[in-house]
Image (spheres, rainbow, N blue to C red):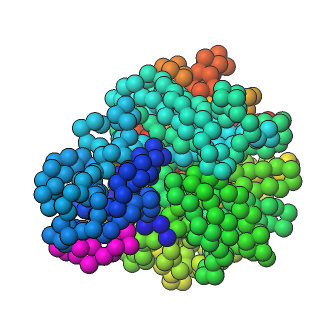
Amino acid sequence: MLDIETFDNLRGGNVAYKALAHPLAAEGLKRLAAAAGRVAVFDPDGIAGPLLALCPDFDAEGVYVQDTLALGQVRGGHVARALTQLKTAEAACVLIAAFDAGRVAERLARFAPPGARVLTLDAARLPEAMLTSKARYLDAVNFATNFVFFRDDGHFSTRLTTANYWAGYGAQAVRFFCRLYGAAGEVLAQWEDAAPAGAGGFVLDSAVVRARFGLGAFTGQLFIHVIGAAGHDVVKYALDTYAADNGASLSCTHDANAWPSERFAGLPAPRADERVTLWVQNSHAVPIPAGAMALDRMGAEAPVAIGAPVAPFATLAVDVAAVLPGVCWPAQVELRAGRHVVRPRYEVERGGRTRIAHVNVERGDLRDDPGIRALHPELGRGFLLPFPVLPRGRFRTIVQPTPMAVHERDMPLRLDVFSADGVRVAERFLGVLPRRHELALDLDDVLRPGLLEDGGHAELVYDFRDGGEANGWLHALFRFEDRASGHAAESSFGGHVFNTIMTYKNEPQSYTGKAPGLSTRLFLKLGFGGRRSFCVLIYPASGPWVEQSSTTLELYDAAGAQLASAALRIACAGSAIVHPAAHFTEAALSAAGEAGYVLIRDTTCRLFGFHGVDDGAGGFSLDHMFGF
């Protein structure tokens, strides 16, 4: 297990981790370690563990602390000693494990061993030109970063789409620093692009990058650092994978999670006619040893090691069936990642078509919450996990609940199904599903013929009629299949309390505000290469809310100029399938361009959405939307 702290729901992201793990900072730390020689580490902020884990080149004589309550703790493999013992350390340098530590260095010098130099982590800072907040180095906006699965191999290309949403929070002169790594972790290219001056769209296509730098085929990862961010320190994007050779494959994923985790879940085992490949991409400048990661059939508690090592920032393709032979759909697979990787992608090949999706962070901090079983009636239906039921004439919709917490033993669930106008048309109690369950429910088995021919949505909810536990981190995998072409897409997400004026802990929540000020701000990219974008907007409600949404679709171009708007009404507990071409003229969409987008706004309720593109020939993609 890599000794790092990354993210938790109470404190948010650990900025010190991002400062140490940044690829440029990692290079600076390596140079600092080479120049320092043997060091005594003074650890005022408790980051010696991640420092020595992410840069094992330091020859650490020991770790010293001034907090008496920290004495005896193990940090970075060393038992913490009292700072009063520093003078006797057998070291050439004292390394203060802190940034902005010049004043501390001056005062600590007289306590250092005779002749020892005093160094700080400021020697490994990012260049000043990359800092958004120059007053405080460990400001979260200085580390608005993320990784992207990026591939261009003659068969597949990838396309990142986002927007300069930081401009809406007052940011100016935003820039994208990009570094592209190849499969072996080598740097293939590095560059900066200016973002639009306003809240315009931004696109990075792997085929364009490949031509720009004269690269050969590659499968690797793109590191992005947004310089000049404001309001959000999270880099959110949609990623399309499309067939560059006119093949039938098409898929999309969304990402906003730049935090390595101990475990990930939501990885489907292959069907008999499928090959499932897990793409493991090292997020750090230290190698992943052979056997440091493993796959386990969910609930089996018999992990099987991934035998190959992974070099710094390298990419490894793992055939799930080769590691777990005999484990087949609808079984689920858990990745024991050891905090080495950011949320990985997986790839499913079937019938000449390939689709990409992502696994999710499996939380280790959650336990059963008895309060959920005793929710006050005023919270209505409580936690909901909404997902689309695509028009049944063309699509099958399959749902598979997924354990997403290490200590989750069972899931007491019910499925409720709603028409687009908000009428509940079916329900089914799913029972108390054990962690190792193999339920993958086809909604054809729930709905009678003729229902939801134009689509609707369904919700998983807790149902304790037969007992069971709940932690509020309800997740599921959703699979959508075109009945004619066989093309499939899949997505996964978690539950919340939606659209009720009453609250429970931090629920309900939205991107900007809490009840009663729930609102919606969702990003819908436009199509590309003749493919048309669409989204499914769901208006879930745990309790009574406004009868109809007051939704606005705002069309923006690549410069951030609003070109047009359209109004939309969605019934409470209902849904709508939105095709931009049905709301805006071809002239307006052409003016917006492929880097333009639709911003979905609603100040009366929180909507939940899934977005994708359709190629008009039986291929489509679908994943959950992001907001800002």
Residue plotted at (51% across, 40% down) = 224
Residue 516 lies left or right of residue 266; in this view the side is left
Q: Position of residue 626 (x, y in %)?
A: 51, 44
Tell me what residue is drawn at x 73 percent, y 71 percent.
323
Residue 294 or residue 444, whichever sits in front: 294
The picture quadrant where one finds residue 84 is bottom left
In magenta stretch: residue 438: no
Magenta run includes residue 77: yes
The quarter of the displayed image where residue 527 is located? top right
The answer to whether 76 appears left or right of 394 in the picture is left
Residue 445 location in percent, x, y? 75, 66
The residue located at (66%, 50%) in the rendering is 184
- On screen, residue 353 versus residue 206, left or right, reads right
Residue 68 versus residue 521 in the image, above or below: below
x then y, percent, for residue 75: 34, 70
Could you tell me if residue 257 is visible in this image? yes
Which is more toward the observer, 344 or 128?
Answer: 128
Residue 526 position within the rendered picture, expressed as x and y whole percent measured from the top left:
62, 31
Q: In the figure, is residue 290 to the left or right of 323?
A: left
Please tell me which residue lies in front, 563 or 448. Answer: 563
**In which quadrant will I find the C terminus?**
top left
**The magenta stretch spans which residues?**
68-81
Residue positioned most to the front = 115
Position of 540 relative to 297 (above/below): above
321 in relation to 344, above or below: below
Q: Residue at x 31, y 76 (%)?
A: 79
